[in-house]
């Protein structure tokens, strides 16, 4: 697991019950892994937005912010900015995933995460602004 950049972000993860913490940390690790392998993304900035762990391409401005959190009483979510077209694009690629309108992919924290699909969604999010310029 990658070290946390900020203590307040680590505190949020530490406060999650294990049922949610484990898959959210797996998604966090995947964000950093995908970022390191995706051209044009640069260093990821980890912070809190709306009290949620958030991942920004502040160095390059290549993407939109990704946020992670619980969703309702029993799920977790991978959030992107609701004014992007990302969730529509994700839906077009992965019809079997669960979505919340135009803002999130929803997961059962006790089910296996679809890591391959999620890696593609992360890469698309981290390069969203680069791809909008083309």
Image (spheres, rainbow, N blue to C red):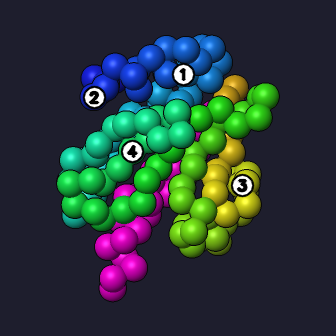
Q: Earlier in the sequence, mark 2 or mark 4?
A: 2
Disc 3 versus disc 4: nearer the observer: 4
Any part of residue 93 in sight: no
Q: Which mark is residue 99?
A: 3
- Residue 95: quarter of image: bottom right
Residue at x 28% of width, y 62% of height = 61
Decide which of tag 1 and tag 2 comes sooner along the chain: 2
From the image, tell me which residue sits under label 1.
22
Q: Given this view, does label 3 or label 2 mark the residue nearer the observer? A: 2
The residue that label 4 is drawn on is 55
> What secondary structure is found at the residue carrying circle 2?
loop
Q: Earlier in the sequence, mark 3 or mark 1?
A: 1
Q: Which residues are magenta?
A: 111-134
Task: Classify mark 2: residues with Cα within 10 Å, few (<14), some (14-19) or many (20+).
Answer: few
Image quadrant for the N terminus?
top left
Give the quadrant of residue 3.
Answer: top left
What residue would you read off at disc 2? 5
Secondary structure of the residue carrying numbered label 1: helix
Whole-percent x, y for residue 105 in the image: 64, 51
Residue 23 placed where, x, y %? 56, 28
Closer to the eye: label 1 or 2: 2
Q: Is residue 134 left or right of residue 119?
A: left
Q: Name the quadrant containing residue 39.
A: bottom left
């Amino acid at each position: 697991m990658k070290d946390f950049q900020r203590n307040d972000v680590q505190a949020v993860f530490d406060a999650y019950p294990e049922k949610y913490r484990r898959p959210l940390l797996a998604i966090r690790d995947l964000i950093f892994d995908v970022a390191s392998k995706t051209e044009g993304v640069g260093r990821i900035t980890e912070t809190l937005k709306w009290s949620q762990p958030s991942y920004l391409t502040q160095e390059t401005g290549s993407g939109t912010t990704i946020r992670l959190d619980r969703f309702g009483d029993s799920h977790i979510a991978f959030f992107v900015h609701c004014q992007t077209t990302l969730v529509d694009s994700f839906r077009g690629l992965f019809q079997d995933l669960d979505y919340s309108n135009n803002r999130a992919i929803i997961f059962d924290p006790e089910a296996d995460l679809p890591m391959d699909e999620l890696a593609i969604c992360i890469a698309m999010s981290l390069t969203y602004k680069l791809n909008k310029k083309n």
